[in-house]
Amino acid sequence: MTASEALNLPAGNPFGQLWETPFGLPPFAAIRPEHIHEAYPAALDKHRAEIEAIKADKAAPDFANTIEALERSARGMSRLGGVFYNLAGADTNDALQAIEREISPVMSRHWSAIMMDEGLFARVDAVFRQRESLRLDAEQMRLLERTHRGFVRAGAELGAEDKARLAAINERLAGLGTSFGQNLLKDEASYALVLENEADLAGLPPFVVAAMARAAADRGQDGKHAVTLSRSIIEPFLTFSTRRDLREESFLAWSKRGENGGETDNRAIVAEMVKLRAEKAKLLGFPTFAHFKLDDSMAKTPANVRELLELVWKPAKARAAQEAADLAALAQAEGENGPIRPSDWRHYSEKVRQKTYALDEAVLKPYLQLDRVIAAAFDTAGKLFGLAFAEKPELAGYHPDVRIWEVTEAASGRHIGLFLGDYFARPSKRSGAWMSAYRGQRNLDGEVRPVIVNVCNFAKPAEGKPALLSIDDARTLFHEFGHALHGLLSDVKYGSLAGTSVSRDFVELPSQLYEHWFLTKEVMQRFCLHAETGEPIPEALIEKIKKAQTFNQGFATVEYTSSALVDLAFHSLEATAEVDPLAFEAAELARIGMPAEITMRHRTPHFSHVFSGDGYSAGYYSYLWSEVMDADAFNAFIEAGDVFAPELAQKLRRYIYSAGDTRDPAEAYTLFRGRLPTPDALLEKRGLAA
């Protein structure tokens, strides 16, 4: 913790103080929304003063007085933002949402002014032009190149009129993205299908009934059961309920989030965002927004992305057609005539899975206790990377559900960071699962270790009962913990290159790769213990899980890839295009031949990856791009004959998990694997190989 993080604020505001808390953990109990609101003007003023000091330096621009000076700036604002934006996503309220709406356009204006400042860019550009004579080390050169590229991509080389227009576009996009996310949260939090009697629970196993009872109680409906739009409830309900009418009703609500009319409808927001993004790209010299975004990625061009997506689309669609025929045959045998509907798919596919693989989710779930899966994720990190985890119940999180662990090097006891786990769904939390940082890692001006959080939306169990996960839930936990390790293990000098600050189509490699370890026999037999008997999962059941991994992959790949193709199509439009989002979505799905029995994983009005901010816009493909690498990378351990092979694990830590953005991603992967991957392992993993 450094003095540069404290802001000029009245006594009593935590953001005006150094945090003398254990490990520099934010003092959550002392922070109130009014503190955040009061702190933002002070943070902006301090950052502007830091920038003016860099510009006013009489010395000739060099790496230290310009590039490193920029690295040292905005630390107070970063500390404030680390708290605010994490709370806004994981435990929001009306006051925080009001601040979010107010501050989004303000922050956009602030950053536009800095990144388009002629005097500041002149200094950055001067250092960049003499880079070959500066005797910089590899990380310094990477920082200089990334800093200069960031200014150019933000419009620093534009003329005054274009700068003004780009700043206005960025400001409007910031506000629209905030509105999109808040509208979606309102739709999700306000919906509950309350079930009144036993007949409404037909087909549901006890773990689903218990989760729905807890959800109803949380909404003041004691003694009843509620289907909510949290994936950990809606998906098992759609899987097991034998009430086709209730499946259809709840699926429709899930599918129509963000398009219900009224103040939470996101369709007009999407139309405006797509047009503004296209105009932004044109101002910056790119034919479309997809060209702009992908120019700074591993993929480089929309053509390369489309090539990968279409490589899997054709075999996935063929597999999905066969799967649909199997489901229809089963439904007809049970007396359900007519085609399979999207609301039917999970229900009948579970029956086919049980019939084909004798794998019953209700039988499997008691082996997947949340606490045991967390322990498995920690133990895997210990075996691969030598880490140890000690829970710190004396430390207070931002919500009673949050648990906190200190992470250390097991051999030396050296502090690595803090890890926060926030696992249960609640109305104040946006849907999905993610990793974020309250504080990132850096070694500039002394070592600063990270504070990392994983946020999930698992169904909360009844009091005194263990939380039970599905296989997908358990893989999600490992996935997000892979991201967490990317943040925790970061070991770079400059914070802007640390942890997950890598290209969007590389950032999913550490997370998707980590999923593989959960499904190994070495992990499952040790940690998957039955919630009632304590018996380890039978080896025969593990084999069934492995054999079933390619089951329903036509559906899963079509559901995902259609979303990625629609995202790419939206952002391949030119700036003059007017778009009706749902009509455009329908036309693109018709063009690619979307099966009628399947819907996109994320339909446009609730596609928060793409429209609640800029993170995955023209970038949803990146999960598949990273999967090419993760499938190939795990094969390295299989080929070594040891899923914890020490030499490989050491290289994985050094070149992938610890390196941040200090190298080009292709170079980093090649240093780990010895070569770049091909899609073969991906197609084999998904069961789509010819």
Image (tube, helix red, strand yellow):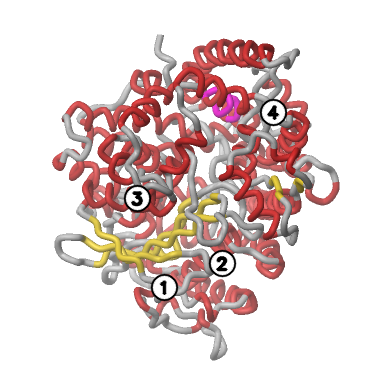
Q: Is residue 241 magenta?
A: no
Q: Is residue 158 left or right of residue 416?
A: right
The foreground one among 417 and 551 is 551
Range shown magenta: 557-563
- Residue that badge 2 annotates: 84
The foreground one among 16 and 562 is 562
Q: Residue furthest right?
A: 262
Q: Secondary structure at mark 3?
A: helix
Of callouts 2 and 3, the N-terminal one = 2
Label 3 amino acid? His
Judged by its main secondary structure, the magenta piece is helix
Q: Secondary structure at mark 4?
A: loop
Q: CA distance from mark 4 to mark 1?
A: 44 Å
- Residue that badge 4 annotates: 343
- Residue that badge 3 annotates: 486
Give x and y (percent) for residue 48.
Answer: 52, 71
Q: Is residue 561 magenta?
A: yes
Label 4 amino acid? Ser
Of callouts 4 and 3, the N-terminal one = 4
Of callouts 1 and 3, the N-terminal one = 1
At x 69% / y 34%, what residue is drawn? Answer: 575
Q: CA distance from mark 4 to mark 2?
A: 37 Å
Please name which of the two marks, 1 or 2, marks the residue nearer to the observer. Answer: 1
- Residue that badge 1 annotates: 25
Label 1 amino acid? Leu
At x 67% / y 16%, what residue is drawn? Answer: 331
Give the position of the C terminus as an image quadrant: top left
| Residue 172 visible in the current orientation | no
Of callouts 1 and 2, the N-terminal one = 1
